[in-house]
Amino acid sequence: MKIIKRDGRAVDYDRSKIRIAIEKANKEVKPKERASKEDIKGIIQYIEDLGKKRMLVEDIQDIIEEKLMEIGKYELAKKYIVYRYTRALVRKQNTTDESILGLIRNENKELAEENSNKNTMLASTQRDYIAGEVSRDLTRRLLLPEKIVKADQDGILHFHDADYFIQPIFNCCLINIEDMLDNGTVMNGKMIESPKSFQVACTVTTQIIAAVASNQYGGQSVDMIHLGKYLRKSYNKFKKEIEKKYSGKLPEDVIEDLVQDRLKNELKSGVQTIQYQINTLMTTNGQSPFVTLFLHLEKDDPYIKENAMIIEEILRQRYEGIKNEAGVYVTPAFPKLVYVLDDFNNLTGGEYDYLTKLAVKCSAKRMYPDYISAKKMRENYEGNVFSPMGCRSFLSPWKDENGNYKFEGRFNQGVVSINLPQVAIIADGDEDKFWKLLDERLELCKEALMCRHYALLGTKSDISPIHWQYGAIARLQKGEKIDKLLYGGYSTISLGYIGVYEMTKLMKGVSHTTPEGHDFAIRVMKHLREKVDQWKKETNIGFALYGTPAESLCYKFARIDKEKFGTIKDVTDKGYYTNSYHVDVREKIDAFSKLKFESEFQQISSGGAISYIEIPNMSKNIDALESVVKFIYDNIQYAEFNTKSDYCHVCGYDGEIIINDDNEWECPNCGNKDHSKMTVVRRTCGYLGENFWNVGKTKEIKQRVLHL
C-alpha cells in the first residue's frame, strides 16, 4: 500500500508509524484512558484489511480517531485530535514560510506557473505574491469554515482567488467609462475633468484602467463605443483651427484633407497610447492590467463613423504588434480584444464588412480578437449586447429604477468551481448516487460562495474610491457601504464547473458529443442552472452559472483525483480535465460541428462561457477563417481562435521550432534556445490546452511553462 502525503508524495505504508503516533498520545492521558497493545493492533489490522492500494494520510488519521472513539477511549481520541490540529497549524505555518522563501529564491514553481501574465522574478510581482501567500494562509486557517478548506484541498471544489480573500475586494467588472469620461472622475485626490479631445480621452482611459486594476483582482472591460464622441470633438477642434487660418485662402476640399490628416494622426496616437500604456504599466498586483477592449458598432449611434475609425485603428495596430526588447514585433498579451459581429459586418455584404475582414486577418496573425455574435447574444440576454467582464464572465440582465437595462458599472463578487468528474468517479455509474452527491456538493459550493458575499458585505466605499465613489462602478458617498450593490442581481456571484466531458465518460461510457452522453450532460447543466436560479430567489443575490476559465484548475482537479483514485482511462490519465463544457481536444470533430454543439451549453451558462477553435497557422488561408467567422455569427455567442503554430518571441519566426543535437529547443531562424521566449506545440497530439503553452527541453515535453 502507498500512503499519499500532504505534499502529494507517495511513500510506502509503515505500520509502525501508526503505533508510534498512538503511543505518543497514550503518554498524555491517565493509564485507564490509554489504548492497549491489542487495541492498537486492532486499529492497524482494520486499516490493512481495507485492502487499498493507496490511502491519504488524512484518511488514516480519521480512521484512528473513529476507532479510538468506538472503543471508548474518548480522552485519548481528544488528545490525538488536538495533537493533530496543532501539527496541522505548524505545517501550515512552515508551508507558508517555505512558499514565500521559495518565491524569493525563485524556487516556487507552483507560483511561477500560476499566472502566465506575471513574472515572478520581478520585485513588484514577488511583493504581490508574498501578500497573496499570507492571505491564502489566513484564509485557510482563520477565515473559511474548515469544511470548505478541506473540500478545496480534496478537490471537491475550488475556492478561487484565496490569495486576495483577506481584503474586501471583488473579482471583475465592466467599467462605466462613459460616466467617468463625460462627468469627470478623481484619481489620487485630483480632479480629472471631461476630456476635450480624443488623445486626452485615451490617456485618461488608461489611467482609469490602471487605477481599477490595482484595486480588484480580476479582469475589466472598456466599451470603446464611448470614445467616438471624443474623436468628433477633435475633428471639430481641428476644423475650427484650420478654417480660421485658411478659410478663403484654400478650397474647402483641401481644408477638409488637412483636417482629416490631423485627425488620422490624432487617432493613431490615441490608440497607440492605449496599447503602449497598458503594456508598459505595472499595477500594484505585479502585472499589466488585465483589460479587454469591447469593439462594437450600433446602427443608431450618432458617432458610428468615428467608432468605425477607432476599431479599424485598434485592429491595424494589433495586427502590427508591439516591439519586444529585441526590436521584433510580437503579439501583446493585453489589451484583449472582443469584436462584435452584427448584421452589417457579418461578411455578407454589409457596410462594415471591411472591419471584419481586418479582424480576421488580425486573428490569423495574432489570435485576437475574440468574436461575439450580436444575433445570438440578443437571443440569450433579452435583446442586449454587452461586453464580458475582462474576458469570459458575463453579467445577467438588470434594469434600473427607470426600467432601462444597465451593464456598465457592474461587477462579479467572486467564483467557486465544482469538480464534476470527482462526483462521477465516486458515483461509479450509479445515477441515484450521482444526483444525491451532486446536490450535497452544490450546497457546499453555495456555502463557499456566501463566504465571498459576506466578506464584501459592510465594505465602505473608501476602500477603493475609483470604484465606489468616482464612477468606475458607482458614485457613493464617502463612508457609504456598498451593500445595496451586492443584492438584487446588480452584481453576480458565480458557480463554475470543470469536466463535463470526463463526467459524462464516467457515467455513460461515452463522450457528451454522442446522443446518450449529450442527454445526460444537458440534464446536469440544466440542474446546475436551476440550482443557481433557486439560490438567487432564496438570497436576492445574483448567482450565475459560469463556464470557468480555469486553466490551472483543470490540472489541479485532475492531479488530486489521480492521487485519490488512481489512473482512470480518458479521465485522470491525461493529466488535465476538459474546461467546463468543452469538447475534449482529442475528439475528431470539425470546427463548425464543435461550435454548433457547444452553443447549447453556452446558452445555459449565462454567467460566462467561451468556445475555442484550435487551428494551424492560417495566415495564408484567410478565406477559411472568414467562413468560420460567418458561422460564428449565425450559430454561437462567443468564440475565439487558438493557433497551433510554433512561435519564436525573439525574432517572430512562426515555423516549426527544431530540436537540436543537444536535445534542446532551438529557433532555426535566430538560434534562440530560451524556451521561455518561444511557444512550442506538444508534438504528440497538438494539444495546447486552453491558454496554456506547453514547452520543454526534451522531445516528450515533460515540462510545462506558462508563457504568453
Image (cartoon, rainbow, N blue to C red):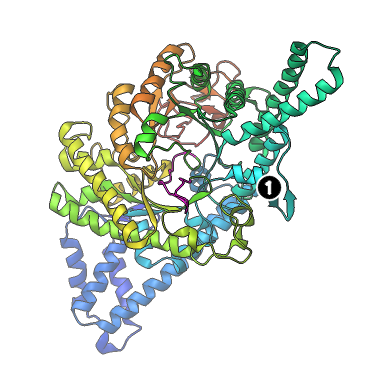
Residue shown at the point (38%, 39%) measured from the top left: 609
Location of residue 84 by image quarter: bottom left
Can you give x and y, in whole percent of width and height, for residue 77 in the image?
29, 78
Residue 638 seen in the current view: yes
Mark 1 lies on a secondary structure that is loop
Find disc 1 in the rendering and name its residue: 184
Q: Is residue 402 magenta?
A: yes
Q: Nearer the viewer, residue 530 or 155?
A: 530
Residue shown at the point (62%, 26%) measured from the top left: 306
Can you give x and y, in whole percent of width and height, for residue 529 in the image?
29, 48
Please state if 358 lies on the left or on the right of 690 as rendered.
right
Residue shown at the point (65%, 22%) measured from the top left: 328
Can you give x and y, in whole percent of width and height, for residue 13 in the image?
28, 58
Indicate whether 83 appears above or below 662: below
Q: Is residue 75 magenta?
A: no
Please state if 408 lies on the left or on the right of 26 as rendered.
right
Q: Residues within 10 Å of mark 1 (few under 14, many from 20)?
A: some
Location of residue 100 by image quarter: bottom right
Residue shown at the point (18%, 56%) measured from the top left: 436
- Specify start and end residues of the magenta stretch as a single range: 391-406
Magenta region, mostly helix, strand or loop? loop
**Residue lying farthest to the front in this orientation:** 248
Can you give x and y, in whole percent of width and height, for residue 588 in the image?
27, 23
Please state if 325 lies on the left or on the right of 548 as rendered.
right
Amino acid beneath label 1: Gly
Indicate whether 13 appears above or below 301: below
Q: Nearer the viewer, residue 453 or 303?
A: 303
Indicate whether 418 appears above or below 43: above
Indicate whether 78 appears above or below 453: below
Please state if 425 lies on the left or on the right of 681 as rendered.
left
